[in-house]
Amino acid sequence: MSRKRSDLSSLEGVGPKTLEKLQELGVASVEHLAEFTVEELVEAGIEYDRAVKILQQALQRVGSTQPATLRELRQRQYRVFKTGVAEFDEKTPWRGVREAFIYEFAGEFGAGKSMLAHQLVVAALKESFTAKAVYIDTEGTFSPALVEAVARRFGVELEKLEDSVVVYQPANVVQLEQIVKYDLPRHIGEGCRLVIIDTITALYRAEFVGREHLAARQQRIHYLIDWLRRHARTFGLTSILTNQVMDVPEAFAIGVKRPAGGNVLAHAVNARLLMVRPNKTKPEGYMWPLDVPGMAPDVRIEYRITEAGLE
Ligand SMILES: Nc1ncnc2c1ncn2[C@@H]1O[C@H](COP(=O)(O)OP(=O)(O)OP(=O)(O)O)[C@@H](O)[C@H]1O
Ligand SMILES: [Mg+2]
């Protein structure tokens, strides 16, 4: 705690008053500060010139103003963990889930989204991709028993997971935003590199009802995803979002589903897959890439649903 404080106050222009404002805002560290915009700091009561000055220093400290050459970009190695869904680990470009990416898995009820979400927590912890995983459950469907079953399947001792999985159950959009903006950076400070949001659009759809609120809803979704992007850039955080689907209203498109959240979400995520379970009496389905860089749109990733997750 004292380290974090001296951290922020080591910046030129951060006196006791500004430090207090930053702490009130919930800024946890210099790295966290570097994620804010000037406007957000001004809104918290810091004068514009000072906000620019301390932000510039914070950005310099984390090095995000440094350019990279094409060679460096081409040689960059990304950390990846295997999901345990065999075809996903075979057919996706990174052969698993990649660091600093935002994934979206959309699908109808019962497609296996929540199962996959639980499974990815165990898989990432097993491979030490992350030291801690944050699971944001907006639907109240988080299941310790399922984590236990997956852990057994993966050969991970439950004891090892017990303190490494942190579950939030926000009741509304404001709480969700608080968790992503202010709680996540604290967990990141303790080694968290994976966050799950199951599901991303549910709270927004419940809270912003009707066409007249659509623009506001889209802005708020965009704002949340933008914070996930900031965490990806600054800390290499990987986000897994699940999403509901909606019927496409156009004629001749009967039975066609599209992820909720509109274009805002489509543009903001790095990899978007649709999960389909054609026959609800059968424990099987397939995923296909709606938009995954480096992956042909006709590839099918078949999976089986078991009591211990997808395989
Ligand atoms: N042991 C099992 N064997 C086969 N299928 C199972 C088993 N246990 C649960 N299921 C089924 O797995 C499916 C996947 O459920 P899951 O909760 O992951 O769906 P979801 O995509 O999250 O749906 P929703 O949109 O309702 O949240 C459910 O239909 C459930 O009935
Ligand atoms: Mg679910």
Image: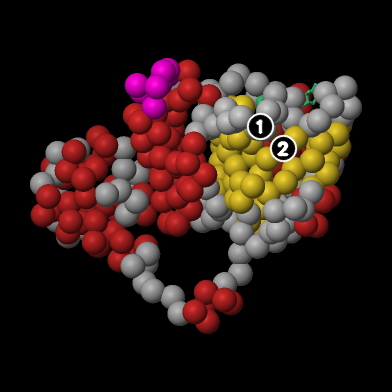
Q: Residue furthest front?
A: 252
The percent coordinates of residue 81 (x first, y second) are 70, 54
- In terms of secondary structure, where does tag 1 sit? loop
Tell which of 65 and 54 is nearer to you: 65
Q: Is residue 19 magenta?
A: no
| Mark with earlier residue (2, 1) | 1
Horizontal relation, residue 176 to residue 169: left or right: left
**Of the residues shown, which amino acid type is indicated by label 2?**
Met
* Residue placed furthest toward the right: 282
Q: Is residue 19 visible?
A: no
Residue underneath mark 1: 252
Residue 210: within the magenta?
Answer: yes
Viewer-nearest residue: 259 or 61: 259
Tell me the tag on residue 275.
2
Task: Report whether the residue tagged 2 is closer than 8 Å to ligand 1.
Answer: yes
Query: Does residue 270 appear anywhere in the picture?
Result: yes
Q: Which residues are magenta?
A: 207-214
